[in-house]
Image (cartoon, helix red, strand yellow):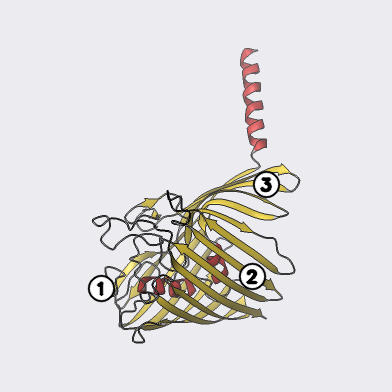
Amino acid sequence: MKLKASSAIALAIFATAAHAQSSVTLYGVIDTGFLYQSTSAATFLPHAPNTGKIYQLKDGGIYASFWGLKGSEDIGGGYKVNFKLQGVFNSTNGKFGLSDTPGTTAIFNQFATIGVSGPFGTFDAGRQIIPMIYAMAETDVRGAQYFGSILTAWLGINQAAGWPGTSTNAPIGALYDSNALVYNSPKFYGASLALEYAPGGVAGHFQGGTRESAVAKYSNYGLNLSAVYYNGHDTNPFPITYPAAPAIPATGLANNRFYYFGAMYTIAGFSVSASYGAGKNPAHSNTADFEMISGGLGYQFNPRFKVTSGYYYLKDKNNSANHSSEFAVGAEYNLSQRTKAYAQVGYVANKGTMNQTIIYGAPVAPGVSTTAAMVGIRHTF
């Protein structure tokens, strides 16, 4: 009887806990392929020497491999409390992804958030991919993929602005922000708004290390429009020689400003996109002031097969000798509901000290032309 009573109590406790938590999901993606690239470099520095051709197994031909946990609890009245923990890992060696600090990794470097959703929209607090990235992806035929897209173009102006690629703390815009408070509104006749504020937590400086952004979007009748404003204070504070040289102390000075306007239209399987972006250091625009222009064209042949292409042009407004033109084309075929195969080729003509990459995480030699090709497979679980 004691055993039966104990078992009943244990089951009741377990049932209560299970009922309180509406759902918890383990999920992820593994994306691996073979990459050939005609030039390479050891770093993203603008004067890095050409180390020659490279052929390697590479993670992230479409997007990075990642894994995560997410869950939600229904608290009634149409409201839910949500959490999300998600981090990148390298499928070729098992290493975790970059953090905000050079030389360190983080288990959950993409998302570590808790929030509330309901009729008002969603509100999430913590480290997360910020709204500007979604706005760019939704107005790029290539979808801001890791191979030849608006993402690699944006990374190109960051590299030109001095980002060494050793942390996620960028000098122009951001992919992730820590300590971020993000609100996403519901859609109203296709229009929506996203607002971000990330306090810096710097003693003595209210604006020290803070970030603010606003994104307006429209999505209806096959048309996607987006407008982005991002402003950061004390971003990318780490010298190239860090930790031998210490991080630059926070002052609250705005040193990271990015604007983006994009559009994409899809009809009868055809998609076309165009965008304009500008990024600079408003405190010292003579050190970083860049423009990027893109155009894309794609066609969905059937539910399983599509081809996309994109052109991405970067310009250094302080030095006309520094500019870059990139073209990429890719084909994706869904082998099943969760697995797809892909093949992609790209070409970039970098001039001056520009070093726009063809694929994220694979530096190219600056100032010369580079060709790359990649075939791979992506599986979702």
Instruction: Say whether marks 1 and 2 touch (CB < 8 Å).
Output: no
Near mark 1 (Cα within 10 A), the count class, few <14, some 14-19 or many ≥20, is some
Which one is in front, 272 or 378? 272
Asked if residue 160 lies left or right of residue 63, the reply is left
Q: Amino acid at mark 2?
A: Lys
| Front of the two marks 1 and 2 | 2
Q: Is residue 25 above or below residue 18?
A: below
Q: Residue at x 65, y 65 (%)?
A: 193
Asked whether, in this view, residue 23 is left or right of residue 325, the answer is right
Pinpoint residue 315: horizontal percent, then vertical percent.
41, 82
Q: Where's residue 69, x and y in %?
A: 53, 47
Q: Residue 237: which quarter of the image?
A: bottom left
Q: Which residue is mark 1?
A: 48
The alpha-carbon separation of the residues under discs 2 and 3 comes to: 24 Å
- Taking depth in this image into account, of 350 and 238 the one nearest to the observer is 238
Write down the residue under mark 2. Answer: 217
In the displayed orientation, state which residue is furthest to the front.
204
Mark earlier in primary sequence (3, 1): 1
Circle 3 SS class: strand
Q: Which of the two discs, 2 and 3, labels the residue nearer the N terminus?
A: 3
Alpha carbon separation for disc pair 3 and 1: 50 Å
- Label 1 amino acid? Ala
Secondary structure found at label 1:
loop
Amino acid beneath label 3: Lys
**Number of the front mark, 2 or 3:** 2
Residue 82 visible to the viewer: yes
Pointer 3 residue = 80
User: Which residue is found at the position 27% from the left and 58% from the top?
Assistant: 242
Q: Secondary structure at mark 2?
A: strand
